[in-house]
Amino acid sequence: MSAIGLLGALLGLLLGLGLLTQRRGPLSANRRLGWLLLASGAAVGAIAATHLLDAARTPWLLLELVAALAVGPLLLGYVRAALRPAGAPPDEPLLLHLLPAAAAAVYAPAALALLARAPAGWEPWLPSTAAVVAYQALYTALAAGAAVRLGRALPQHPRRRWVWSLLGVLGAVHAAQLIRLLRPDEPALRELVPATATLALYALAVLGVRESSFVLLEQLPKYRSSSLDAVRSREIAAAARAALERDRAFLDPDLDLPGLAARLGVLPGHLSQSVNQELGQSFLDLVNALRVAEAQRLLREPGHRHLTVDAIAARSGFHSRSSFYSAFRKVSGTTPRAYREQPAGSLPS
């Protein structure tokens, strides 16, 4: 199991470095995910090393402490970056949150230097396992709270499901840690935490590849160089459709592609690509089709007969008379006025 753990740690370290050097996609979020994978890989590798090198485990225990104290704050920072809407101000720096890990990083080499000169049997001080586990669980809870808060603001955010998958993986690790704390003398549970942490790192690696779009699925020729994969494309298209149809965002005459992308927390280019690939039309055509459908409803209903055509255009979200007439003719094949004057039974659907 320890050898598998070392391979998992190496995988996490390599993926973390890959994310830190990536030049496409949401860079801030990907870089924080990269640091999270690096810290997680270091922690898993240190745990595996302590099991393989039981006689010389102190250096690895110190490395594990540094990495374990860094994982929680990095998780919180990643969740905030992943779910932050585009255009929103940056969240608070992580420096204060990383102070315990930084202090441990300073303490570790000092402790090793003392260990080299200390009498036989001397061991440097290390916090209890329960304290470190509680510290990690606290940050996982803070990250979950941030995910809930940001999710309420943007319920259709395309990275929301991925973030909760990540939190679920870490929750499984905390469950294993708790079981081990409650049954410290059970030999059969000795490998429970290393095994769970290793599997969690493999899961994070798979999810990280999917999230960062290292693997590009089949796309339209126009978007072959895009960092957007097919799964994310469907998620963004569904979020855009929900915002337009359910929330009726198309009624805002100032709605544009960058504005809706900021509302959904995605890149404008990704939104444009998703609408084209998944819905088979451009963003402007999609919005105009919804606006024309609203205008047709108003033109048909007797209760709105008192409204002028220009008033109906404004209520349907059109900025100008010319754009309204152009879009209406393109969709329905006739003018708004002619559409209103047609008998109800002969109106095109």
Image (cartoon, rainbow, N blue to C red):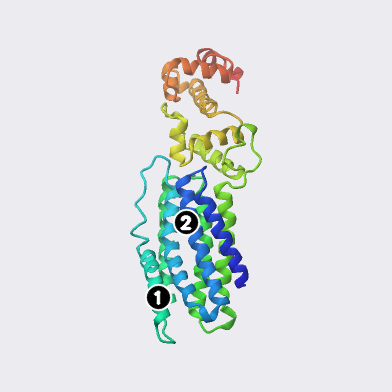
Percent position of residue 157, x then y:
48, 45
The foreground one among 302 and 230 is 230
The mark that comes first in sequence, 1 or 2, is 2
Q: Could you give the CA–CA distance between mark 1 and mark 2, rounded to whole angstroms?
A: 27 Å
Callout 2 amino acid: Trp
What element does badge 1 sit on? helix
The foreground one among 269 and 110 is 110
Q: Quadrant of residue 13?
A: bottom right
Q: Is residue 114 left or right of residue 57?
A: left
In the displayed structure, 138 sits above or below 179; it is above
Q: Residue at x 41, y 19 (%)?
A: 311
Q: Quadrant of residue 232?
A: top right
What residue is shown with label 1? 113
Percent position of residue 5, x then y:
59, 68
Residue 336 seen in the current view = yes
What element does badge 2 sit on? helix
Q: Residues within 10 Å of mark 1 (few under 14, many from 20)?
A: few
Percent position of residue 217, x then y:
64, 43
In the displayed structure, 28 sits above or below 37; it is above
Q: Residue at x 44, y 16 (%)?
A: 321
The foreground one among 281 and 272 is 272
What residue is shown with label 2? 35
Which residue ends up furthest to the bottom in the rendered image? 120
